Image (spheres, helix red, strand yellow):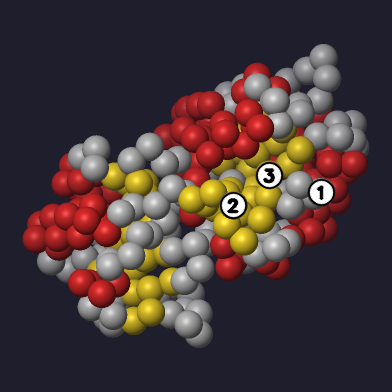
Amino acid sequence: MTAPKHHRPPRLIASDLDGTLARGDRSISDRTRAAVAAVQAAGSVFVMVTARPPRWLHELADLVGDHGIAIVANGAILYDVGRQQAIRTRMIEPAVLHEVAIAIREAIPEAEFAIERSDRYGQEPHYVNRWPRPENTLIAELEVLLAEPAAKLLVRHPSRHSDDLLAQVSALVGERVTASHSGGTSLVEIGATGVSKAAMLADFAAELDIPAADTIAFGDSLNDLPMLAWAGTSYAVANAHADVLAAADRVCPTNDEDGVAAVLEELFDL
């Protein structure tokens, strides 16, 4: 891997977390933490752009720098990690949630649903969680679960590969919402129309007066593609989805090899 030669280091670095910045065990290595701290000390802005819900960012507050901001829920929420407060949200309205959930359930009866709000997680009683659910989880039937706006509607299938499930769900929902996946097992994540990591990142960058040309972005999964396309220079980690590897400008070492840190070390002469 050879990082591109810039006249100056990038002003904004945007990175996905799981599968990209985080290792396979979801930890952030000391090497990566040191690289992130160094680029921020050099005056560049580092921002995490993730599918994770807000509650899964609190343990990583040391990575957000002075600005304190992370982009979560695939771009549906701009989140102040230190204050544990949503700054801006782009939610799916209840009527749309019901419409798309019913369309999916009629076509895929085995589908199970969960939701992420800015302050609470909810699921159907039979939804199978990959991770321990929060203590305040709303467990309810679909009608109750979808009664309030949601940042994400999660669609899980007992056995279908996420790529296949995404293809079918996308055909069912059309342009009423935005469907993607972040590499989860048999899982599709749905946001409001127009919501993406790229859209919220572009807004964040504009507020800082940083153009896309001065931004580099790192990712590994299909939900990262819009962000990688928006950034002036894009990197896929070597463990990325084949479509991401094909779309990115450059490929860096895997997440378990601290690929993001390796690029930052070269760009900033660390």
Please tell me how crowded label 3 is: few (under 14), some (14-19), or many (20+) other residues with Cα within 10 Å.
Answer: many
Q: Position of residue 261 (x, y in %)?
A: 76, 43
Q: Position of residue 241 (x, y in %)?
A: 46, 42
Residue pictured at 21% horizontal, 65% vertical:
111
- Quadrant of the drawing holding the C terminus: top right
Which one is in front in this view, the residue at disc 2 or the one at disc 1?
Answer: 2
Q: CA distance from mark 3 to mark 2?
A: 15 Å
| Tally of marks | 3
Q: Position of residue 248 (x, y in %)?
A: 54, 28
Q: Which residue is mark 1?
A: 66
SS under mark 3: strand
Residue pictured at 42% horizontal, 35% vertical:
243
Please tell me how crowded label 1 is: few (under 14), some (14-19), or many (20+) other residues with Cα within 10 Å.
Answer: few
Q: Is residue 20 above or below residue 102?
A: above
Residue 12 position by quadrant? top right
Q: Which residue is mark 2?
A: 87
SS under mark 1: loop
The residue positioned farthest toward the bottom in the image shown: 135
Question: 238 left or right of 139?
Answer: right
- Quadrant of the drawing holding the N terminus: top right
Q: Is residue 194 above or below residue 160?
A: above
SS under mark 2: strand
Q: Which residue is mark 3?
A: 47
Q: Nearer the viewer, residue 55 or 189?
A: 55
Amino acid type assigned to the residue bearing label 2 in the image: Ile
Q: Nearer the viewer, residue 189 or 135?
A: 135
